Amino acid sequence: MGRYSGRWISTPEVCGELGICERTLMRMKARGDFNAGGFFRRKTMAPRSDLLWNIDRVMGLLGATPDL
């Protein structure tokens, strides 16, 4: 499995799935909980491009389970 495998979703979608606000997610990112490439990446090469999140890896790190 490559580093970009898994389900990649937008910031609002990952916050909805985790039940947290965007500010909390960004604090966790700034604290170093998530590394670039494995947990998140930019949609484009632009430095201020929106982020995409690997929801499977994020949920695995946080011990969250998806709603079925």
Image (cartoon, helix red, strand yellow):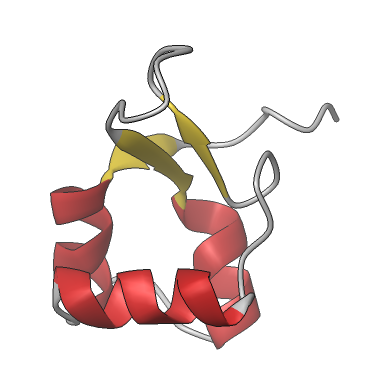
Could you tell whether 12 is left or right of 35 in the image?
left
Q: Residue at x 34, y 69 (%)?
A: 26
Residue 47 coordinates in the image, percent (x, y): 42, 26
Looking at this view, is 21 or 67 the one in front?
21
Q: Is residue 22 left or right of residue 53?
A: left
- Name the residue located 54 percent from the left edge and 55 percent from the top edge: 56
Residue 31 image offset from top left, x and y in percent: 56, 82
Q: Residue furthest right?
A: 1
Image height of 39 relative to 32, above or below: above
Res 1 quadrant in image: top right
Image location (x, y in percent) of residue 64: 45, 83
Q: Is residue 68 visible?
A: no
Q: Is residue 8 left or right of residue 6?
A: left
Rendered image quadrant of residue 25 = bottom left
Residue 19, compared with residue 10, is above or below; it is: below
Q: Residue at x 14, y 53 (%)?
A: 12
**Residue 45 in view (yes/no):** yes
